[in-house]
Image (cartoon, rainbow, N blue to C red):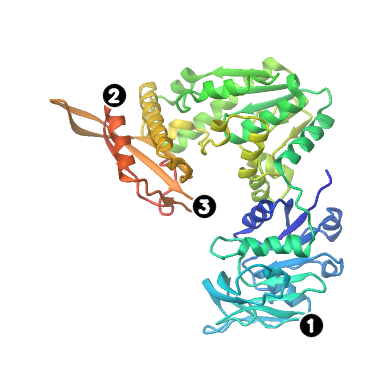
Amino acid sequence: MNRENIVILDFGGQYNQLIARRVRECRVYCEVKPYTTPLSEIMAMGPSGIIFTGGPASVYADGSPKVDPELFDQGIPILGICYGCQLMAQELGGSVVPAESDTAREYGKTDTVFDLSCALFSGIPEKSITWMSHGDYMERVPAGFKTVAWSKACPTAAIADESRGFFGVQYHPEVNHTQYGTDMIRNFLYNVCKVKGDWTMGNYKDTAISDIREKVGSGKVLLALSGGVDSSVAAALLAEAVGSQLTCVFVDHGLMRKNEGNEVEAAFKKWDINFVRVNAETRFLLKLAGVTEPERKRKIIGEEFIRVFEEEAKKIGAVDYLAQGTIYPDVIESGAGDAAVIKSHHNVGGLPDFVDFREIIEPLRLLFKDEVRQLGRELGLPEYLVTRQPFPGPGLAIRILGDITKEKADTLREADAIFREEIAKAGEDKNLSQYFAVLTNMRSVGVMGDGRTYDHALALRAVVTDDFMTADWARIPYEVLDKISTRIVNEVPGINRIVYDITSKPPATVEFE
């Protein structure tokens, strides 16, 4: 698969996935690799440019991460970010020292001035805000470099040797807090690395289908389909590539949202594939009867899923390939390409050993979530599948606090459907990252008509986030919440009180359990 490629060398920074996402958003393919990747392997990737990430170490400390010095002699443009900037400076003859407490050390939003003659800053204002996070200081820049950005506390906020295509910035252009940060990354890609920007999901779809067909040949592929975005898009891509050679096993554990199982099944009728739906609500609810501890719920559902999948796999017999919906963040978090780790990390890593297959296929392992969604659109999946919110594997089991019964699951399904419907009607769905209802184990006194009620309290949860590492509770308009509350209490028996969760993450998690 020949394409433009930016190699991002990971030095342990907290924003490394975000750097890769920004590059991809500029329509340029990139891969994140450990800083220990051998030079020969880096060069074999044919990089158009290299980005050094930030990291927690100090370049002058013993044992701090380094790169092969010959990397700087390969004629490849390099952008160093924070630690990566200081590493470049140190390795090329400059000097990096601990910053004094009152000068050069910077954290947070910082007024910064740029030399607009530098290719990195083409088309941006001379002054803007950057997000600084460094306790070290470039006391002396290397020969051939000049200072191209500065702040009140730091005279070397950015350096450049444009003759060699080397640039370093002390701040983080990848975060939203840095104004024009994406423009700076785009300038590096297009003005310095001279890429054309050929990374699109349309191109990826065509290439991936061709690659899958070549790999699979006449073999059989088995996919455990959860109904989530990743597995659904993987199924659609494989279906387009190999058709009836694919078998999808969809285990409906009876803890999905309203009509979700039928929607998943309907979405895959257009492809010539073997689609097996296992309606296993009864057996899952029996296993969960009386269980209230959240982690125990998760383990029961995970184990029972394996058992159901085992039974269906035995009916199918030997298959050549087992497909997984692994996406690129899984790969990065698992060690940036260590296949053995990835399989155990992924959500079907626990599939039974007896399933007879030759190899695992991970057709989405190069993609971020937003790219997976776009690929789904390219493949013709309906928008309600492509834009589906994150949904936990245990489903409604961890949104029903306390013990689980079919009656509670049905009650929550109806209430959750009303919540999602009214959010969409109000146009608020475009502003929210995730929103759902939770059936609490609290009952309260209420009055309906002339009678006393003693029914469940339902909690509504909605958050806004870029990465789900942190999340802020969503400010849904009061009139929308009022309509949701009125409808749920009037239309869903067993609920007489609605509460709205206004806790951010941290200290709370997004899910209740």
- In depth, the one of 146 and 453 nearer the eye is 146
**Which residue is labeled 1 in the image?**
143
The answer to whether residue 220 is seen in the rendering is: yes
How far, Cα to Cα, is label 3 from label 1? 40 Å
Q: Nearer the viewer, mark 3 or mark 1?
A: 1
In the rendered view, tell whether residue 198 sits above or below residue 261: below
Q: Left or right? Give the position of 482 relative to 175.
A: left
**Which residue is labeled 3 in the image?**
469
Mark 3 belongs to which amino acid?
Answer: Met
Q: Left or right? Give the position of 463 relative to 332.
A: left
Say which label, 1 or 2, has the lower sequence index.
1
Picture coordinates of residue 204, whole percent (x, y): 74, 40
Picture coordinates of residue 485, whole percent (x, y): 29, 35
Q: Residue 349 is drawn in which quadrant?
A: top right
- In depth, the one of 60 and 364 nearer the eye is 364
Which residue does the image show at 60% across and 24% down from the upper left? 267
Mark 2 belongs to which amino acid?
Answer: Pro
Callout 2: helix, strand or loop? loop
Which label number is shown at residue 493?
A: 2
Q: Nearer the viewer, mark 2 or mark 3?
A: 2
How far, Cα to Cα, is label 1 from label 2? 75 Å
Mark 1 belongs to which amino acid?
Answer: Ala
Q: Residues within 10 Å of mark 3 (few under 14, many from 20)?
A: few
How far, Cα to Cα, is label 2 from label 3? 36 Å
For the C terminus, give its image quadrant: top left
